[in-house]
Image: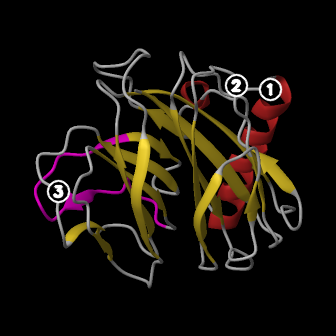
């Protein structure tokens, strides 16, 4: 099947789900979405999250590696987008074990977590070796007494993102002090640097690559109100905006 036709069919399915419900649960979108269920931890009441450092690397056609000082971090996350058709495999240069909490459409958008790293420090590198033009945003975090992946939501558009805002879908945390991570993917390189995110999310970075990538985060206070951030992208292209939340 022509790759462009395949992508358009995917986007039509995404839009159909978004019309059916305000919040799009990734679990409902198989086979295009895969979410790994939480396996422990969870619940509110833990210490507050805080983002220590971030680093990012745009894809250049082959394997992508990003390096950062993770000294002091107790939780690690990676926001990944790519253009290949295989599930991304993340390699940690220090030997930490990571979990793919979200895998959208075979590598186009993934969110990885390492909630209990055994190794942190200077020169900490992570790599994606099996996805072409892979972009990585590396996030080092402290806090959370027993953190766990809770849920995710998504929204998308087909061919007409240019200048518009796409919302990730309403997502309600189970308690206060949750960490929200959001990642945008678009299939052509226009835009990126001038893109914006709303709802109090902090933009980490955005790449004018092909495909493109943008990332953002928000740390909730004690409230447990829903979040539905929007990403305004300047390029006219297909795209998706996904958010994930983690309990402390």
Q: CA distance from mark 2 to mark 3?
A: 32 Å
Q: Main secondary structure of the magenta part?
A: loop
In reply to whether residue 97 is colored magenta, the answer given is: yes
Within-10-Å neighbours for mark 2: few <14, some 14–19, many 20+: few
Q: Which residue is mark 1?
A: 22
Q: Disc 3, disc 1: CB below 8 Å?
A: no
Q: In front: 47, or 98?
A: 47
- Magenta range is 84-100
If the image is split into quadrants, where does the C terminus sit?
top left
Q: Position of residue 142 (x, y in %)?
A: 33, 44
Tell me: residue 207, above or below residue 71.
below
Horizontal relation, residue 128 to residue 186: left or right: left
Q: Which residue is mark 2?
A: 226
Q: Which residue is mark 3?
A: 120
Horizontal relation, residue 125 to residue 42: left or right: left
Q: Going 73% across and 40% down the picture, which residue do you hit?
A: 14
Tell me: residue 18, above or below residue 109.
above
Q: CA distance from mark 2 to mark 1?
A: 12 Å
Disc on the earlier residue, 2 or 1: 1
């Amino acid at each position: 099947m022509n790759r462009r036709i395949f992508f358009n069919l995917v986007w039509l399915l995404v839009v159909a789900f978004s019309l059916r419900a305000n919040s799009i649960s990734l679990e409902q979108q198989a086979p295009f979405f895969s979410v790994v269920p939480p396996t422990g931890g969870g619940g509110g009441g833990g210490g507050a999250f805080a983002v220590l450092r971030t680093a990012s690397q745009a894809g250049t056609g082959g394997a992508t590696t990003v390096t950062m000082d993770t000294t002091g971090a107790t939780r690690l996350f990676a926001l990944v987008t790519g253009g290949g058709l295989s599930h991304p495999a993340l390699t940690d240069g220090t030997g930490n074990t990571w979990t793919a909490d979200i895998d959208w459409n075979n590598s186009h958008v993934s969110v990885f977590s390492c909630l209990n790293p055994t190794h942190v420090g200077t020169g900490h590198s992570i790599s994606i070796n099996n996805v072409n033009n892979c972009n990585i945003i590396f996030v080092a975090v402290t806090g959370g007494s027993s953190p766990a992946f809770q849920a995710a939501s998504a929204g998308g558009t087909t061919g007409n993102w240019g200048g518009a805002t796409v919302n990730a879908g309403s997502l309600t945390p189970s308690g206060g002090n949750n960490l929200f991570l959001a990642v945008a993917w678009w299939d052509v390189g226009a835009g990126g640097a001038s893109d914006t995110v709303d709802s109090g999310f902090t933009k980490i970075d955005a790449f004018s690559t092909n495909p493109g990538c943008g990332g953002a985060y928000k740390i909730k206070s004690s409230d447990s109100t829903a979040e539905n951030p929007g990403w305004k992208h300047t390029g006219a292209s297909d795209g998706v905006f996904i958010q994930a939340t983690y309990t402390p």
